[in-house]
Image (cartoon, rainbow, N blue to C red):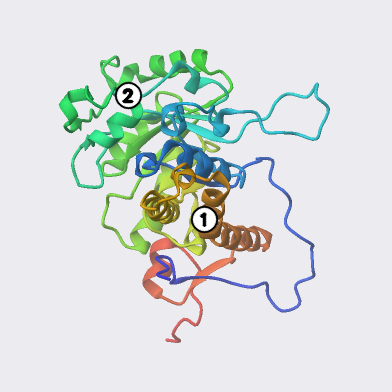
Amino acid sequence: MNHRLGNICIVPPPLGTPWTGPPPQTESPWLPLFWFDPPWHWVTATAADAIATAIGRREVVVTALRRDVMDESDEPALFQPVESEEDDTSEPRFLPRMLPYRCERYGLDVADFDHAAVIDVRLFATRDATGRQGYSPQQIQRWEAAPKDQPVAGGGWVPTAPFPPDVPEVVNLKNKLLQLRHLSPQASLFVSIHAHRLFDELPQVLGSEPDGVILRFDELAIDGLRLARLVQQARTLIEQCGSETLPLWIVPGEITPDDAAKLIHLGASAVAIDSWGQVALEEVQQWEQQISSGSTARLRRTDRQTVQRIASQSLQPKIDRFRGVNATLFGIAGPTSLATVDPTWARTLNLPQLFPEQG
């Protein structure tokens, strides 16, 4: 397992530290983890719904449009109230879902706004796995549900847009967020951008008064040290703009559970787990291909329980590891819960250095 932040270590309490019990529970019902951009079209809609529901039940915010997970005959479980043992008069509870408000709004339905926990206004041109700034025919087919003999754009690639066509300039973004607040008053309004021009563009985004920001570092070829420092700098910039408590969610690219917990401690409010989710999607995709080649007709329909078991076996160990490491970090008193033996890391991140060389 390649720990990008492996040079940062968790320092146990000093000898003689009295036991203080477990760390206090957070107010949020969610883990500080989210699945930013799942390629749901890799699997059938029924399988996508099963995976998304399984992840949501583990308190991870999952991104999906209704058409990402809607089978022709079934109502998506992701959009239904969670069964509760409490009194029937209590408010219905829904799984934590993020609505991806892309510039082109392909596949977006008014029902997507209902009970969304987060609306993410995405100010960037999406890049497909092939490297194109566009959407594949398979993706467009899932969103638009056009007849197979009448595909959107003639069955070719559809280019993506970097900015909403109904927003003239960045200074007008605040009006767009106000519009979305009326459509979904219960949701938190986030804005996501690439981190390539972090110090120029983040202040502009903050001027639109979002409820949170998401920074994409996943397309930057940066090492763990640079990633950690940029997270610290982004948090400092947010504080300097007068938004000390504003949530900062980051999309770091491939990380381990330990990396995710350390990034939380360094200033992130939540961390994307797309690299973990992609593994689960690939395993379900392989399973679907196997049963589709079989001769038993009833196996051609996705078995939700099997899909959820495959996804759980792939993701649960990582989520459990994150829970444990994160609880350890926030259970240690004092400023020395993170440290490093590397002088460059210590100097760059302002962390204590273990075993410094004696002059």
Q: Residue at x 44, y 29 (%)?
A: 65
Which quadrant of the figure contains the C terminus?
bottom left
Q: In the rendered image, which quarter is residue 202 located in?
A: top left
Question: Residue 319 location, x and y as percent?
Answer: 57, 57
Label count reads 2
Q: Residue at x 29, y 21 (%)?
A: 164
Q: In the rendered image, which quarter is residue 167 located in?
A: top left
Q: To which residue does mark 1 refer?
A: 310
| Residue 81 visible in rendering | yes
* Three-letter amino acid code of the residue under disc 1: Ile
User: Which element carries disc 2, helix, strand or loop?
Assistant: helix
Q: Are marks 2 and 1 in contact (CB under 8 Å)?
A: no
Q: In the rendered image, which quarter is residue 13 located in?
A: bottom right
Q: To which residue does mark 2 refer?
A: 144
| Residue 265 visible in rendering | no
Q: Is residue 177 above or below residue 102?
A: above
* Three-letter amino acid code of the residue under disc 2: Glu
Query: Is 124 on the left or on the right of 15, as rendered?
Result: left
